[in-house]
Amino acid sequence: NMGCPEKNVNKQGSGATLIGDPLNAQEIIRACKKSGLPVSVKTRIGLEHIDYHDWVCYILDTEPEALTIHGRTRKEMSLVPAHWNVIGEIVHLIKDKKQSDIIVIGNGDITSLGQAQDMAATYGVDGVMVGRGLFGNPWFFQGTTLLSKRTIEERLLGMIRHTQLCEELLLQYGHNQFHHVRKMYGSYLVGIPHAKQFKDQLGRVASPAEVMWTEFVSCEALLSTSTRSRERMLTTMKYLPQERPVVAQLFGCKVHQFEECAKIVRDLGFDGIDINMGCPEKNVNKQGSGATLIGDPLNAQ
């Protein structure tokens, strides 16, 4: 990786900083090639401004198996459109040096398979690397349909299937890294009703099962004059798979509120109620709910 623009990487002298230290970069590539494994390099088209010619030539002298070009400078991060015309210029530079055996891969702003194919044909790259264009869009490889064209139901069901697959992998390899799975949920929710509330809710789940089964809601929010919580819960019931039980997890401390909320949850079509008496968060506990109920067993009963 000789292209990462992140400050915490660059301050160590690695990532895109190596564009300004080409002799060291060459030594690094050659050192890796001593392993006998194929070595590829990913980089950018400059540091502060577009200036790629000498840098690319330094890389080519080490004869890597592949070169991936991200079409922005380090300074540009991902804040401007990728300069695919410059990627095309680099392809011509490599061909002029008669190093056609090096695989050249373009990267930047690819959001569909059709676009990837068009860019490859237009600029002569051997392949395309996709990053953010895949977030929340597992349908990318099926064709040219953009994520924005997918229905709410397709997106929520896709998110659930994605979660199930991740759960299977986590179990298979004995990892408990569910927080990595949560990071991709926001991309599925872009542009759908109540997206912020869904995202906030999903940010609190601790396991894949909760993503598929549980709707978090406080009694006060559910009983308030605002209909936002009920609308979100209705959206959940409408689009989640019918064969899966959906549970409402309630926060609160007042008996009469729970009684009213239980009826609302039932009438909304939920399959069950989970009473949260374990949440340790201060903003929940100061209201007398969550784990605070451990110290108030009669009220909890």
Image: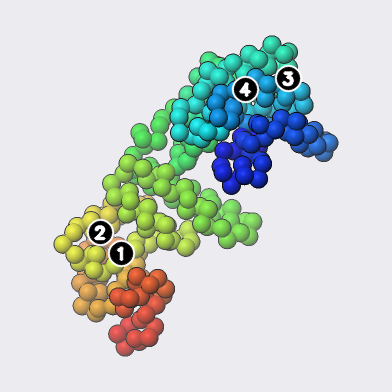
Mark 2 and mark 4: Cα distance apart in space: 53 Å
Mark 4 to mark 3 CA distance (whole Å) = 20 Å
In which quadrant is the C terminus drawn? bottom left
Q: Is residue 245 visible?
A: no
Q: Residues within 10 Å of mark 3 (few under 14, many from 20)?
A: few
First in sequence, mark 3 or 2: give its number: 3
Density class for disc 1 (Cα within 10 Å; few <14, some 14-19, many ≥20) is: some
Horizontal arrangement in the rendering, residue 299 relative to residue 82 (left or right): left
Mark positioned earlier in the residue sequence (1 or 4): 4
Q: Secondary structure at mark 3?
A: loop
Residue beneath disc 2 = 229
Name the residue located 58 percent from the left edge and 30 percent from the top edge.
Answer: 47
Going by the picture, which residue comes out furthest to the bottom? 298
Marks 1 and 4 sit apart, C-alpha to C-alpha, by 54 Å
* Residue at mark 1: 217
What quarter of the picture does the N terminus occupy?
Answer: top right
